[in-house]
Image: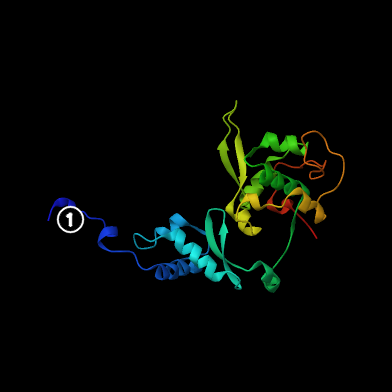
């Protein structure tokens, strides 16, 4: 036996399991995971030669229309309760709190304009953005620091995270509702707007206190 033959990869010596078995493996991995998993993370736990993408699509089709569905969260995958059955989970919610207006506006700007710098957020809002608001959104896991802009000063940019997408049942930021949908839901005001500003989406109030805590991001109901 030549040295090359001795070094034959496991992939060539042992064929991967059949696709139905691969589906079962992926199903077990995702079911046991507390967090969404990427294809790379899933593949690292499967035998060599498995087609993770095909197994995921087959598994997703098999769960379509059931009470639990396989959902894509950004670049990751996870099992989630079907959206139309969410009302059954209401008793599991301990507390529901709203973000403050400043935090909501900042989060909305990042989601719709990402990647966006702090200066661009302030330009869109028309008021200064305190460091505390962005920092606390990062602590909540909904926003993260992106790449630096290749402009003078190389400012950092901000983007939403997969945790944010998962929280709101989105596959990607492209699934965010458009202006027409927001207006139809009564979430946008119809009022004149300045140049470059999103119509009626952002208010005039400014952030207060750069040293705010996570509690300051929420309004009491």
On screen, residue 171 versus residue 14, left or right, reads: right
Q: Most extreme residue toward the left, as rendered? A: 1
Snapshot colouring: rainbow
At a point 39% along the width and 58% down the height, the residue shown is 44
Residue 17 coordinates in the image, percent (x, y): 35, 67
Camera-side residue of 154 and 115:
115
Label 1 crowd bin: few (<14), some (14–19), many (20+), radius 10 Å: few
At a point 65% along the width and 53% down the height, the residue shown is 175
The residue wearing badge 1 is: 6
Residue 208 coordinates in the image, percent (x, y): 77, 42
| Quarter of the figure with residue 195 | top right
* Up-down relation of residue 118 to residue 103 (above or below): above
On screen, residue 42 versus residue 174, left or right, reads: left
Residue 201 coordinates in the image, percent (x, y): 79, 45
At a point 61% along the width and 44% down the height, the residue shown is 159
Q: Most extreme residue toward the top, as rendered? A: 152
Element on which disc 1 rests? helix
* Up-down relation of residue 9 to residue 147 (above or below): below
Camera-side residue of 2 and 112:
2
| Quarter of the figure with residue 126 | top right
Q: Most extreme residue toward the right, as rendered? A: 191
Residue 111 coordinates in the image, percent (x, y): 67, 47
At a point 38% along the width and 61% down the height, the residue shown is 50
On screen, residue 161 versus residue 51, left or right, reads: right
Camera-side residue of 112 and 143:
112
Which quadrant holds the N terminus? bottom left
On screen, residue 4 versus residue 29, left or right, reads: left
Number of callouts: 1
Which quadrant holds the C terminus? bottom right
| Quarter of the figure with residue 154 | top right
């Amino acid at each position: 036996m030549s040295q090359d033959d001795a070094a034959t990869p496991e992939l060539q010596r042992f064929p991967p399991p059949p696709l139905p078995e691969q589906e079962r493996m992926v199903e077990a991995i995702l079911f046991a995971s507390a967090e969404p998993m990427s294809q790379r993370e899933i593949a690292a736990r499967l035998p060599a030669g498995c087609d993770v993408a095909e197994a995921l699509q087959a598994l997703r089709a098999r769960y379509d229309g059931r009470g639990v569905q396989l959902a894509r969260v950004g670049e990751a995958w996870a099992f989630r309760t079907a959206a139309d059955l969410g009302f059954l989970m209401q008793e599991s919610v301990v507390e529901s709190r709203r973000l403050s207006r400043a935090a909501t506006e900042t989060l909305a700007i990042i989601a719709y304009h990402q990647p966006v710098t702090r200066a661009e957020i302030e330009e869109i809002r028309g008021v200064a953005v305190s460091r505390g608001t962005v920092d606390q959104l990062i602590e909540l896991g909904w926003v993260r620091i992106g790449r630096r802009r290749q402009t003078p000063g190389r400012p950092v940019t901000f983007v939403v995270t997969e945790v944010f997408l998962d929280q709101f049942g989105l596959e990607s930021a492209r699934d965010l509702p458009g202006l027409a949908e927001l207006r139809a839901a009564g979430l946008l005001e119809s009022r004149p707007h300045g140049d470059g500003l999103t119509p009626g989406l952002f208010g005039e109030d400014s952030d207060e206190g750069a040293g705010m805590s996570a509690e300051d991001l929420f309004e009491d109901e």
